[in-house]
Image (cartoon, rainbow, N blue to C red):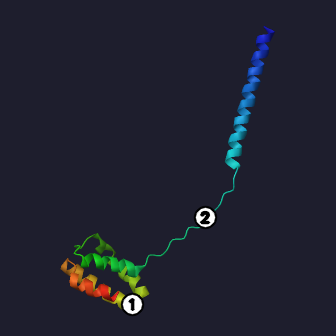
Amino acid sequence: MVLTHMTRITDAGSLLNGSMLALALVLAGCSSGVVQDRVLESKPMDSLAAARGVLRNYVDGQPLGSEAIDFDSLVEQVTRVDPDKGDRLKTFFDRTRRTGRPDASQAKKLLSEF
């Protein structure tokens, strides 16, 4: 009987030691290593390149689509870079909105100026 009691105590001690070891490993794993902050830089979108892309699509025959939602924003961005080009782009987009279709020849002419 004494032997059985001692075995139970030893088993309980092993269990306790194993639990403490597992806890120590978990805590060591959580706190080890150095946290490094990385600064991610995003490049601003080139508004002239975006305008050229829209115009190129119209030259290639793309019909007026959802990009029309962003016309005003694109004109504003281009105007910040080059006010003259922004005005010409606005005129083209206004005409495109009125007619409901982009004029490929006008888009080609404007694209050559961009």
In the image: residue 40, left or right of residue 7: left
Q: Is residue 89 above or below residue 42?
A: below
Q: Position of residue 25 (x, y in %)?
A: 70, 40
Q: Which residue is mark 1?
A: 83
Q: Are marks 1 and 2 in contact (CB under 8 Å)?
A: no
Q: Which residue sits at x=30%, y=72%?
A: 67
Q: Say whether residue 12 is left or right of residue 52.
A: right
Name the amino acid, label 2. Arg
Specify whether 41 is left or right of 46: right
Question: Residue 50 in the image: x percent, y percent?
Answer: 37, 77
Where is mark 2, residue-wise?
38
Q: Considering only order in the chain, which callout, 2 or 1, is on the residue closer to the N terminus?
A: 2
Secondary structure type for disc 2? loop
Query: Residue 76, how many percent across, how many down?
Result: 39, 82
Q: Residue at x 79, y 15 (%)?
A: 6
At x 77% / y 19%, what residue is drawn?
9
Q: Marks 1 and 2, Cα distance to the nearest angstrom? A: 37 Å
Q: Amino acid at mark 1?
A: Pro
Q: Nearer the viewer, residue 54 or 13?
A: 54
Q: Is residue 104 visible?
A: yes
